[in-house]
Image (tube, helix red, strand yellow):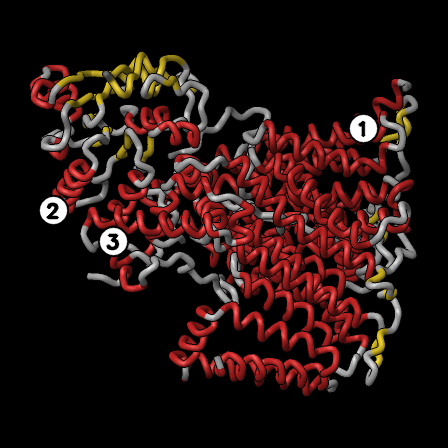
Amino acid sequence: MTIELIVQQILNALGLGIMYALIAVGFTLFFGVIEVVNFAHGEVFMLGAFVALLSGGILTSIGLTMGSVPYFLGILVLVLLTGSIFGILLERFIVRPMRGAPDIMTLLITLGASIITREAVMLFVPNGRNPQPFPKLFDVDSINIGGVLIKPETILCIILSAVLISGLYYIIEKTTFGRYIRATAQDREAAMMMGINVKKVFIITLALGSALGAVAGLMNGLSYGIIKFNMGFAAGIKGFAAAVVGGLGNVYGAIAGGMLLGFLEIFVVSTVPDGSSYQDLISFVIVILCLVFRPAGIFGERAYEKV
Amino acid sequence: MELLNVENLTIRFGGVVAVNEVSFSLKSGETLGVIGPNGSGKTTLFNLLSGIYQPTSGEIVLAGKATKGMRSDEVFHLGISRTFQNGRLFWNLNVLENIMMGMEEVRNSKLFGSLFGTKKEKIIQEKAIDRAFEIMKIFGTLLTSQAHKASKDLPYADRRRLEICRAIASKPKVILLDEPSAGMDGVETETLMNDLIKVKKAMPDLSIIVVEHDMAFIKGLVDKVMVLDYGKRLAYGSFDAVAKDENVIKAYLGQGDGAC
Amino acid sequence: MIKILLTELLGYLLFLVFVYIEEPILVVAFIAAMAIAGITLKKRAGLLLQELEKTYVENIGKVGLIAVMIALTIPFAIMGDSYWLQILNFMMLNAMMALGLNFMTGRAGLICLGYAAFMAIGAYTVGILTLKAGISFWIALPFAGVFASLFGVILGLPALRVKGHYLALVTIAFGLIVQELLLNLESVTGGTNGLIDIPSPHFLGIDMGTTVNFGFMSMTYQANFYYLCLALLVLTTVVIYRFSNSLFGLALNAMREDQLAAQCYGLNLTNYKLLAFAIGAFFGGIAGGVYAAMINFIAPENFGYSLSIIVISMIILGGLDSIPGALVGAFFLTVFPEKFRAFEDYRVMFYGIIIVLCLLFMREGLLPFKHRIFKPKTAARGEEN
């Protein structure tokens, strides 16, 4: 393999990895703060992509030209908004009523919500059953740097996720609200007694995590140029897997886990003959192995069950 | 001869030594009280004894057999059964079924037998049910009258009683009672004390280890007492000797956690 | 006794009315009327219903017997309508799967979101054995169950170490892996194209894939399979019932309630988990085997994630751990959508909505699990004061 190809693949892996990382962050936030595993989280990824696709028309109709910076920012804002609203709705109508129910019930209800969302997109988006071409946002061809073809979308995605993750870091570590989130994650009862509005923390956590997942969907559309109503399923599984690899509840672990999964997948696809048809299979096997042998994540210590 | 021998038992979680070089022994029919403030390693000690945790070092020997490397179900078959601090009943099962779960018979039931409803299986089942009612009768009609109620619908004190019934259903050699009086007021605690004395009378060979953080509660019940503090054995001996022990008084007064 | 007979006959009559009405408005009106009748009955005559329920529970054997008798007459009552016979066949296969899954998830508390994989394994076992090895269906069918059980044990191995959410994910991944394998092992499974021309079974020298003649009435081949499915469903129900109402079933319940406490009370979790997976998977395999022989054509896409979800929604609607619940759930969720074929596209969404609504408003399901399987010999002993 030539050095150019290797660099190329590293870029691809980076692009895929940050996407998984953004989804994984949501899973890990929900689990850490609210103690739910949201099986509908993959759908927000799909919704993000579809909103980006559909909002193009609205934005051009208010006079923004395609490919311009305000146009892209407009799409980004709409995607973030959709993600947050989805998260808030999920909190209000799915997660909150299930407080105190057995884990298995909460899990199943988020599963139900994911099916409804997915099918709704398939049914109500025109021609939603078929794959939708995702428009190129920039009229720039790939840039050739020393034999390495770089798509501007990849660069944009990497920068965008770097910005988002730094933003998340800032919110969690530096703001008062981030302190509330961390406090709730550590001990909900104590946080409540200290006067933290835990309900609000839940809502905002879900909104925040879902918004990031939606952006990942937008990135997927940008990078691969095609989106489909059922793309949230595999993305959700891989995002969850990445979160588990990094240790559920650990935000930075989730980012690392996403990267790891991205690199592993690209590695398999590019080295194993006919690897791309086994791409998903291999991810799933990794998921199972990781869950079985390192359930606390690669950075986590062995957890002792509280008795 | 000693029934249970524990020697230099130690467990580390990362940097924390939750139980540190604890040793004690117990004769058949004896009762040991383990006291100490919250976080002193009482529950961890129980988890070690019942095989949930594996010790970092040290030994537990029950009736001549070392339990090292055994899972908790294997330890149970050796003759140690326990209750849990926060009450881990099988909440959606009824009182009768909870007690039956403590019995050997349930594990002896064979797949084939249950599929074809063999006579042997029926006899096993009937015997288990009869025995469960016998055990409930230790507490008079308190439990028998609620035998078909789901355990989550029981009043708090009855849950504790049920836990004790479930623990003794297997005719164990040793039972471990993890803070049986937690969350009870004085009157309830006294009733529970009497209940435990009833159990001791009904099963004179049974050894009991009972965890408490209040010494007063176990006064009439125990033959000896062990005090734990930060995982270490602070004092060990008869109730009176331990109550007068200087280290114990200091530890308790120092914490401002009045013992009596 | 007479009460049971009459109520079951009433149910039968309502079902037939439902089958015969075609007009969508009438169907909606019928369902609405049933729902209103049900709710008013519960409000106005709750005591009566409770009494009826008690009679049913106490005479469960007779209830089953009458139900089977009635079921035997259905092909004639619907005049051999091949379309409805086929739906009822699917319904019974679904019911077998629901019972199997319910045993794993409802009784033993081991969540499984990849149950369709077991059906796939059963279907491909029968398909490959009868088509490629020329083995008789009747020998292949038990193998379908056994292979599914084997895969159940394989899936059970990771389940020994993970639970709850993690197990859910492992089982989803398992379902996908099986599907991917079916797609990729082309030489054996036919890949995307699947297996075609799977032979129909022969019973007493009669090809079950041909028309059946009762003398006064002849019916399409679906009637053959109707009776096969019915026999297998009855068998499944009896086996699951026996297992559930034994001490073994009790131990599984305890494991569901609290694995750690169950282990501290002497349960070898390894054995019990693997057994629960093996038994639950077995019936999925059998259902798949019959499916393959009935449809004569199988492909990986028939056994996807959405099938697993459909089976899950059946046991949620019926009530987790409830055997009659699983049967009723399979019945409603297979038969009702057929009346709304115009809305075929909305079907999967409908299952999603059922899951969400049930969990929000009816967590116990339509027919919640009933206790008191163990009674002392003298009934009075429980009540003595």
The amino acid marked with disc number 1 is Val
Residue denoted by label 3: B143
Distance CA(mark 2)–CA(mark 1) = 68 Å
- The residue at the point 24 percent across, 46 percent down is B161
Image quarter hosting the C terminus of chain B: top left
Amino acid of disc 2: Val
Q: Position of residue A125 (x, y in %)?
A: 77, 63
Q: Nearer the viewer, residue B67 or A307?
A: B67
**In-image side of A302 versus A272 (left or right):** left
Check disc 3 and give the amino acid type. Leu
Q: Chain of mark 2?
A: B
Dot 1 falls on a residue whose secondary structure is: helix
* Residue A36 left/right relative to A152: left
**Relative height, residue B242 to residue A38 (above, below):** above
Q: Residue C275: percent from the left, percent from the top?
A: 58, 42
The 10 Å Cα crowd at callout 2, few under 14, some 14 to 19, many 20 or more, is few
Dot 2: element: helix
Residue tagged 2: B187
Checking the image for residue A268, the label placed there is 1
**Percent coordinates x, y for residue B114 in the rendering:** 51, 50
Residue C73 picture location, percent across and down: 69, 79
Taking the image as drawn, is residue A70 in sight?
no
Give whichever of C166, C382 is nearer the camera: C382
